[in-house]
Image (cartoon, rainbow, N blue to C red):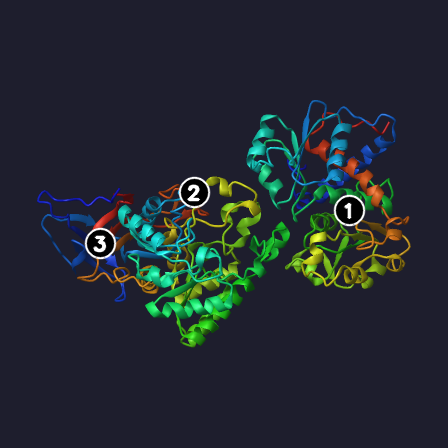
Amino acid sequence: MTAATALQADGARVRWLIKGAEIAGPGGPEVADILLSAETIQAVGTGLSAPGARVLDAGGLIALPGLVDLHTHLREPGREDAETIETGTRAAALGGYTAVHAMANTDPVADTAGVVEQVWRLGRAAGYCDVQPVGAVTVGLAGVRLAELGTMSDSAARVRVFSDDGRCVADPLLMRRALEYVKAFGGVIAQHAQDPRLTEGAQLNEGELSGRLGLAGWPAVAEEAIIARDCLLVAHVGSALHICHVSTAGSVEIIRWAKSKGWPVTAEVTPHHLLLTDELAVGYDPVFKVNPPLRTAADVAELRRALADGTIDCVATDHAPHPVEAKETEWSEAAFGMIGLETAVRVVQQAMVDTGLLDWSGVADRMSVRPARIGRLTGQGTPLEVGRPANLTLYDPAASAEPVGHGASKSRNTPFAGMDLPGRVVATFLRGTPTVVDGKLT
Amino acid sequence: MMKRHLISAADLSRGDALLILDTAEELASLADRPIKKLPTLRGRTVVNLFFEDSTRTRISFEAAAKRLSADVINFSAKGSSVAKGESLKDTALTLEAMGADAVVIRHSASGAAHRLAGWVRGSVVNAGDGTHEHPTQALLDAFTIRRRLKGTSTRGSGLDDLRVTIVGDVLHSRVARSNVLLLSTLGAEVTLAAPPTLLPFAVNTWPCAVSYDLDNELPKSDVVMMLRVQQERMTAAYFPSVREYSRRYGLDAARMARLPEHAIVMHPGPMNRGVEIAADVADSPRSTIVEQVANGVTTRMAVLYLLLGGTEFPAVAQ
C-alpha cells in the first residue's frame, strides 16, 4: 500500500497551499503561507494564492520541518507480530515524522547489505516516511567481530549510522576499531551505553525503589562508565560517536565535558526519559520496564536542561513495540521497551515547551534538524524555505489535552496510555504528499 | 480492617498486625487439644501455587488451611503446564475458573504475587516472591518473639523497645525485607548487620539502623535473626570466601556468649550449619528455630481466617 498521491484531472499532482501557519525555524516564529509543489516548497509568504491548489487552513498551527527519529525499532524482519515496516511507519507519520532510522536488532540482524537493503526497500514501498536502516556494528550483535560496515555503507541503503542497540559494544578494542573504521565513509557509531557486568540481571534503576521492590538494581554508573570511556576513545581516534538514550544526570555531565573539549560527540534522549520516573514501577507493571530504565526526578530535570541547552542534541523515540504477552507477565520475565512514535512531540510539548525550556524553533532543531544531521540525511531536517524538500508537520499545540489511546502501531505498550497529553499532530507532508491530514492517515 | 490480599508487610497497619498475632494466640491453644480442626473455612478452597520448591512453607500453609477445614489444592510448577510454558496469567485464570477463594503463591520473580492479585478475584497470600517479601514469615517471627520475650498473655501488645538484629544477606532476602517493615511497625528497633555488599543500595531509607560490625551489635540485642547464605552468592564476589564470611558474620558459641542472658536466636530455615550459624548455637535453648516452624502453622491459620472472613471465630477460650 502506498500513501495516497491525489492527482488532478490533468494528471498533475495536487499542490497544497497551507494558510497562516506559524513557521518554527531559526529566524524565530513567522506566520506565513506555504505553497507545496511537486516535491519541494514553491513559495513562502503572506497572502499567497494558487489556483487549483488544495487549501489547508493552518491558523494557530505550528509548521515544523518533518520530524526525524534516530532510533526506531520497526521489528521487520522477524517480529512482524509486534510491528511491521508498514505499521511502524504509519505510526511515525501520525506522530509527525517524515524519516525514521530503523534499528538493526531484527531477526535476521541488519548486519549485511542484503538485510539493510530489504528494510530500505520495504520502507520505500510503504511510503509513509523515509526509512533509513541502521547497520549492526558487530556480526549478529554478538560483540565479537565487526559486521561488513563498508558494504552496508556502499549498498542502496547507504547506511551511515551503525549500532548494536539493545546491546552495548562493551569490548573497548572493538569499539575503538569500529569508531576508526567508519571514518572512511563518514559514518557514526551509535552506542547503547550499558556495561554488561554492572547490569547482570538488572531490572530497574538502582535506588530506593529497586531495594524496596526486591528487583535487581541498574546503577547509573553502568551507563556513565561506558559513555566516559567512549568519549575518551573519540578524543584519541577522532571519530564520530552518538550516544543513544541518555538517561542519567551523570551522563549529561560527561557529555557536557566532552563537548567542551570539542570532541565530536552527540547524544539523544527519549520522550519517556523526559517525563517519567522510576516510581511508576511500584505496581510491577512491565509497561514501565525499559532499557535504560526510568530514572529519578532529578535525572529527568537534568535531561530536560541538557536538551534545552543543546548538550543533548536531539529527541529520539526508541519506539520499541512488543506483543501483549511480552508485557502481561512477571516484571523480570517481561520485555524491555515502550512504543513512542505517536506521542513523542506531545510529550516534548509537555516536558519542554509548556515548561518554558524550549520554544518551537528549538523543537524543530531537536526533533528534525539535528537528528537529520547526525543521521547524515540530506533531504530531511531542512528549513521551511523555498526550494527545500516539502517535508513538514503541522501541529496544534492548543488542542485540548486528550488521553492517549490505541493508535496505528501494531503494539500497545505505551507508558502514556490514558495519560492526558497536550497537542495534536494535524498533518504530515512527505515531499509534498500528505501522509496525514486532519490527524488521520491519508 | 485488613486488605483483601497479603502481599507486603507494608500492607499491615499496627492494628492489622496485632489482630493477626492475637488471633494466632487464640488458635495456638487449639494445637494442644486432641482434635486440632476447626470448621471455620469449610467449603472454601485454598490453592497453594508453588513455582519454587519449598516443602516447609507449602506444608505449613497446607496444614493451616486444613486445620480450618478448607479444601486445599496443591499446584506445583514442576511437571505442570507451567513447565510447558504456560504464563502466570493463564495459570491464574485457570485457578480462577476453579473457584479459588485464596491463592497462596511462592514464585521466583519479585512482584509475582502483586501481578497475580490483578488477575484473580480471590485473596492472594504472598508466600515469598523472589527477593521481595515473605510477609507470613515476618508474622510468625513477630509471634515467636512476642511469645518468647513477652509471654503468652500479650494480646494487644507490640514489640516496643525490643532490639532485633538481622544478620546476613539482606540484599537478596525477602525475609529481611518483610521483617524490617513488620517489626518496625510493631515498635521494635531493627538493626541490619551485614557486609556492605549484601545491603541494598538505598538501605539508609529503610526504617532500621545499619551496622557492618556484628560483634558491636550483639550485647545490645534482644533478638538475633540469622539469614541463610544462598549457595549462589558464595561465588559471586559478595564476599571473598565462605570462611571469611563465617568468621565475620557467622554466629558461633563465642559470639552467642556476647548476647544478653534473655536474648533469643532465630533462623527462617533452612540453615547452613557451620556457615551462618554454628551447630551448638542452632541446638541451644536460645534457639527458636523449631518453635518458628510450629508458630508458622498457627500464624498462617490466623492470616487465612482473617482474609477469608471465617464465619465464626474459633471458640477456643472455653
The residues bearing labels 3 and 1 have C-alpha atoms spaced at a distance of 69 Å
Residue A44, image x and y in percent?
A: 17, 60
Real-space Cα separation, disc 2 to disc 1, in angstroms: 43 Å
What is the distance, in whole Å, between disc 2 and disc 3 at their CAs?
29 Å
Between B261 and B46, the one nearer to me in the picture: B46
Mark 1 chain: B
Q: Which residue is mark 3?
A: A431
Asked if residue B171 is positioned above or below residue A403 in the image, the reply reads below
Q: Given the image, on which type of amino acid does mark 2 rest?
A: Arg
Camera-side residue of B98 and A161: A161
Badges 3 and 1, same chain: no
Q: Is residue A190 left or right of residue B273?
A: left
Q: Three-letter amino acid code at disc 3?
A: Arg
SS category of the residue bearing label 3 = loop
Q: Which sits in the foreground, A163 or A283?
A: A163
| Residue wearing tag 1 | B268
Asked whether A209 or B73 is in front, the reply is: B73
Amino acid type at circle 1 is: Pro
